[in-house]
Image (cartoon, grey):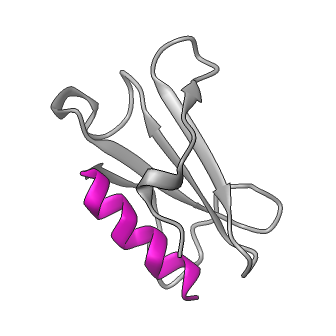
Amino acid sequence: MKAFKDLEFEPHRIGEGIIAHMCFNNGYGVSVIQTPYSYGNKQGEYELAVLNSEGEITYETPITGDVIGWLSPEEVTYYMFKIQSL
C-alpha cells in the first residue's frame, strides 16, 4: 500500500506551496496539497482530495463528499489506505 512517504511533492502551479498526485491500481487516486489557500496550511498540515480514474476530483465516494483538510502525514496515509481499499 502506498503511503505519505511515497508522495513526490512539487511546486504548486499557483506559484506557492506544494502538490502531489498519485493514482492507485483501483482507478482512484489522491491529490495532496499544502498552499496558502489549503485547509490546515497555517498549521503545517495538508489537504487531500480523492481523484477519479480521469484524475479529476470526485465528491462521490464512501470516503468523503468534499476535500479533507487539516491532516497530518499520518492522517494522509490513513486516507490513502482507505482509498486504495475501495
39 lies above or below 52? above
x%, y% of residue 71?
27, 52
Q: Which quarter of the picture shows residue 25? A: bottom right
Task: Give the tally of numbered discs.
Answer: 0
x%, y% of residue 17?
45, 21
**Residue under the point 45% across and 81% down:** 82
69 lies above or below 24? above
Q: Does the magenta stretch include residue 45?
A: no
21 lies above or below 64? above
**Residue under the point 57% across and 24% down:** 12
x%, y% of residue 72?
24, 51
Q: In this view, does 53 lie to the left or right of 32?
A: right
* Closer to the camera in the image, 81 or 71: 81
Is any atom of residue 4 visible in this view? yes
Farthest right residue in view = 54
58 lies above or below 57? below
**Residue under the point 64% across and 20% down:** 13
* Magenta stretch prevailing secondary structure: helix
Is any atom of residue 63 visible in this view? no
**Residue under the point 57% across and 67% down:** 59
* Closer to the camera in the image, 48 or 21: 21
* Closer to the camera in the image, 52 or 65: 52
Q: In this view, does 53 lie to the left or right of 1?
A: right
x%, y% of residue 58?
63, 65
The quadrant of the picture occupied by the C terminus is bottom right
Which stretch appears magenta?
Answer: 72-86
